[in-house]
Image (cartoon, rainbow, N blue to C red):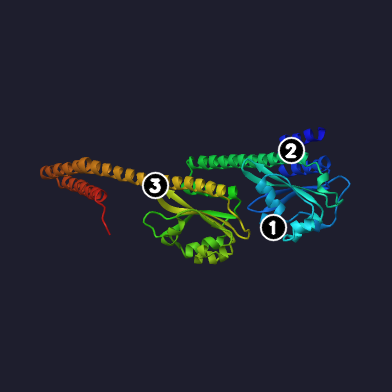
Amino acid sequence: MARLLRMASIVTQTHRLKPALRSLARETTAVCRADRCSVLLWRDDALVSLVSAYAPGLTSRDLRRSFKSLRLGRLEDVPAFARARRDRKPVIVSDVTRDVAVAPEWCTALAGGPFAALPLHQGHRFLGLLVLDNSMTARPASAMRLDVAAVIAAQVALAIDHARLTGELRSFIQEAETLLSVGSTAATSLEISEVVRRMTREASRAIGADSAGIYVAHEGSRFLEPLAAYHLPKEFLADLRGEPLVWSEFEPFLAQSRWTDDVPHDPAFAHPILKKFPMQSLLLVPLEARNRRIGFLVCAWWTQRRTIKPDEVRLMEAIAGQAALAIEAARLAADAEQVAVGRERTRMDTILHDTLSSTLFALALKLDGCLHRAESEESRTMLEGVKQHAKTMMAQIRGLVTPRTA
């Protein structure tokens, strides 16, 4: 009973799955009278070993008898495993060579000894198996305390599910923190190039990419412009400037986010620009503003084969959405500034035409009258000079109001 209570405390108090399961496996060998206890996880449609522990005083130096690096893609290759999952109850195997004949590496790991497979379920989800074996002493599996093992299996399933929930919560928190940082950057008064550069950096760090960049097609332009880059090789940027990307070639390709972990051999990523650089994995996320695609966010891994998870794609799409809004807001602000400049010019034109120009014209008329009344040559010369200055000012005002076109 004391051991069972200690095992329950391990499940509820630890925050790291593997050390917790290793401790549970050691305790299980003693409580259930087994030579070895192994925990196998069902992950990515395959059964893989997570931990394996011998009873105190027992050990094996034969690495072939270890479950390390073993992977079972089809549970049917070990019928006892498939039955345990299907029937949701322990399955005992006395003759390993017969039951595991089609999976010789698993037969070797079990060393021909009898074993019991207990399914790990949490609700309707299959999490893996708890396997007890007597491969060292060859004692019959009936000597094991399978009633106790069933209770322990429930504790192990709880620990695995707790670790999953903790991991998901941690992932959600990290995602929220990343988006908060990106949103704060978007709200700053920095230049748009610096805002987008910081967003690109956040995207690269959040997903662990070697490099990242944001490319935008400005309205009316045929080509994509590299607006921001993070750790992109200089030769890559130089090639882009020498051979710009044609937006019409990329836009249909970016109807949705796309990724590959094998750029050189994936026909969907057979663009000539990608052939010039030895990248291994690539993620492309469209930038959309007001129901219109304006560019894309790219994350690259030069040597790593990187599998992109759905939640990572979701995070990158959120960052791309923030970047698209920032870019569109900057464009609208620039348009508004141009409109404001145009309005101010019109206002100044009106002032110059309706006030100063009229005043100068009236001045010229008065100067004509003064010239007719001037008695001395010296006075007429001075008045002619003033009149000429007035005409020059009027001509300059006309040039401002109606600029000459080339």
Instruction: Say whether disc 1 or disc 2 marks the residue closer to the N-terminus.
Output: 1
The kind of secondary structure element at disc 2 is: helix
Q: What is the quadrant of the N terminus in the image?
A: top right
Nearer the viewer's eye, disc 1 or disc 3?
Answer: 1
What's under tag 1, amino acid-wise? Asp
The reply to whether residue 294 is in sight is yes
User: Based on the displayed image, in which of its 4 quarters is residue 304 positioned?
Assistant: bottom right
Mark on residue 290?
3
Judged left or right of residue 292, residue 158 is right
The answer to whether any part of residue 198 appears in the image is: no
In the picture of the structure, the residue carrying the numbered disc 1 is 77
Tell me how far mark 2 sits from mark 3, CA to CA.
Answer: 56 Å
The residue that mark 2 highlights is: 151
Q: Is residue 91 left or right of residue 202?
A: right
Q: Amino acid at mark 2?
A: Val
Q: CA distance from mark 1 to mark 2?
A: 27 Å
Residue 110: where, in percent of width, then height? 79, 54
Query: Alpha-carbon distance for marks 1 and 3?
Result: 53 Å
Task: Kindly state the secondary structure of the residue where label 1 is placed.
Answer: helix
Number of callouts:
3
Dot 1 and dot 3 residues touching (CB under 8 Å): no
